[in-house]
């Protein structure tokens, strides 16, 4: 059976502005769909998205996890040694990085990160209103993450621009990509410099990668590129994760009341916000062989777009998936992916999200939307530009 064609452009403005309006049609069309707009296959049901993520031998990453097929096209930048790699390379680099982003490292960071979240949220709560994106979601990760890596102080504001460019580059070379890339040479040059050993502070996660290189766990060139992974994946993701956490809590006062009554639900609240609105909406894989999914053939060497966010709201898997419910069991959600590539920084993101949720629960009596969020269109991220909320301090 051939894949059912679905005539929507998953990187068009209309789709990116409200992807959730289109996901139902994608899931309903079939287990495997054909997307003529981008000449690629797609999967949007939970069962098949999570199965593909788990089967990295059939659905590989080394030919790129964006639309560009590295077997046929020049990558936008030197491929990531984690995200755009398969075993055995991936397993070596991932092991090295896992030792740095360890439970112990996160445990040590918690007290300082908690104090920073508390102070920021308490200050914001004393006003009548604030912008949950520009004054909270974009601020908090920048208060904690660059220092943890040990980044140079000058020019850190380039991180958000750089990440937006790279996440756009996973899609086609559309207007969104072109608009982002214009005038971006400085941000790219800054990131290249920031990844170098001589520009990293001692004691940070960046220098720790070079110390692994000194132990011959990787080359110095590989170390630079692994540090680049921290810089690319570590900021815009948590910015928008936290943004959508606040969006969800403010639009669902009953859930915020539950959280206020039991701040220990903070961790679950952030996890549910990631299921409910998944920051990384999509990633591609490439088939390493002819494969049949639910009776539909996908040939070897095909790009397959995995709709993570659609899987996370699949009514075939979740009860009332549109409902934001912080007490829901969200285990198995694919907001951080699944399998060997599952987010390296998930503990970092969870810690940031939990601490912001907890700070809101303890310091804010009410938080309500002042209108709709303003979106920033990105080919991969569900991103926010601005979201004003009214607050009362606790
Ligand atoms: C998950 C992710 C997104 C973007 C870049 C990277 C990883 C990387 O490894 O560079």
Image (spheres, rainbow, N blue to C red):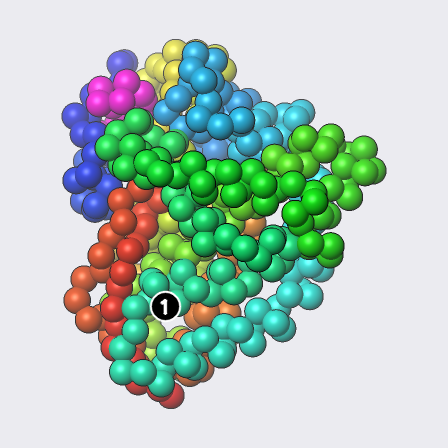
- Residue 178 sits above or below residue 69 on the image: below
**Name of the residue lying farthest toward the right:** 215
- Identified at 46% across, 69% down, the residue is 356
- Residue 388 sits above or below residue 289 on the image: below
Give the labeled residue for mark 1.
Answer: 135
- The number of callouts visible is 1
Q: Is residue 61 visible?
A: yes
Q: Is residue 253 visible?
A: no
Can you tell which quarter of the image residue 94 is in?
top right
- Identified at 41% across, 81% down, the residue is 123
Q: Is residue 31 magenta-colored?
A: yes
Q: Is residue 18 left or right of residue 226?
A: left
- Identified at 53% across, 73% down, the residue is 116
Pick the residue in front: 187 or 104: 187
Element type where label 1 sits in the image: helix
The picture places residue 66, in percent across and down from the top left corner, at 40, 28
Can you tell which quarter of the image residue 344 is in?
top right
Q: Is residue 318 left or right of residue 195?
A: left
Pick the residue in front: 382 or 303: 382
Can you tell which quarter of the image residue 127 is in?
bottom left
- Identified at 35% across, 44% down, the residue is 381
The picture places residue 176, in percent across and down from the top left corner, at 27, 36
The picture places residue 193, in percent across and down from the top left corner, at 58, 41
Q: Is residue 39 magenta-colored?
A: yes
- Residue 96 sits above or below residue 72 on the image: below
**Name of the residue lying farthest toward the bottom:** 394
* Quadrant where the image shows the C terminus: bottom left
User: What's the magenta region?
Assistant: 29-42
């Amino acid at each position: 059976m051939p894949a059912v064609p679905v005539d929507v452009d998953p990187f068009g403005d209309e789709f990116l502005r409200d992807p959730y309006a289109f996901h139902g049609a994608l899931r309903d069309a079939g287990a495997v769909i054909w997307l003529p707009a981008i000449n690629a296959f797609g999967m949007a049901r939970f069962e098949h998205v999570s199965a593909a993520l788990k089967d990295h031998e059939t659905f590989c990453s080394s030919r790129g996890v964006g639309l560009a097929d590295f077997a046929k096209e020049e990558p936008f930048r030197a491929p990531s040694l984690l995200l755009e790699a398969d075993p055995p390379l991936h397993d070596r680099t991932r092991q090295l990085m896992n030792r740095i982003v360890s439970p112990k490292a996160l445990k040590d960071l918690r007290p300082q990160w908690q104090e920073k979240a508390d102070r920021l949220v308490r200050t914001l709560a004393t006003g009548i209103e604030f912008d949950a994106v520009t004054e909270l979601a974009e601020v908090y990760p920048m208060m904690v993450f660059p220092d943890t890596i040990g980044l140079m102080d000058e020019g850190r504001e380039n991180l958000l621009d750089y990440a937006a460019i790279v996440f756009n580059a996973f899609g086609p070379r559309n207007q969104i990509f072109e608009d982002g890339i214009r005038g971006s040479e400085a941000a790219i040059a800054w990131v290249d410099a920031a990844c170098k050993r001589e520009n990293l502070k001692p004691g940070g996660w960046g220098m720790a990668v070079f110390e692994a290189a000194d132990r011959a766990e990787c080359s110095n060139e590989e170390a630079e590129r692994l540090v680049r992974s921290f810089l690319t994946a570590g900021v815009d993701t948590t910015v928008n994760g936290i943004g959508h956490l606040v969006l969800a809590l403010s639009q669902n006062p009953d859930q915020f009341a539950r959280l206020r009554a039991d701040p220990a639900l903070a961790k679950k609240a952030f996890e549910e916000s990631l299921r409910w609105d998944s920051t990384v909406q999509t990633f591609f894989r490439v088939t390493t062989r002819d494969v049949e999914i639910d009776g539909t053939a996908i040939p070897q060497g095909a790009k397959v777009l995995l709709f993570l966010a659609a899987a996370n709201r699949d009514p075939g898997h979740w009860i009332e998936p549109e409902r934001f419910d912080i007490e829901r069991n969200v285990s198995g959600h694919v907001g951080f992916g699944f399998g060997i590539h599952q987010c390296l920084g998930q503990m970092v993101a969870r810690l940031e999200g939990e601490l912001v949720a907890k700070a809101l629960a303890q310091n804010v009596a009410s938080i309500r939307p002042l209108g709709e969020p303003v979106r920033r269109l990105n080919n991969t991220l569900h991103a926010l530009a601005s979201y004003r909320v009214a607050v009362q301090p606790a």
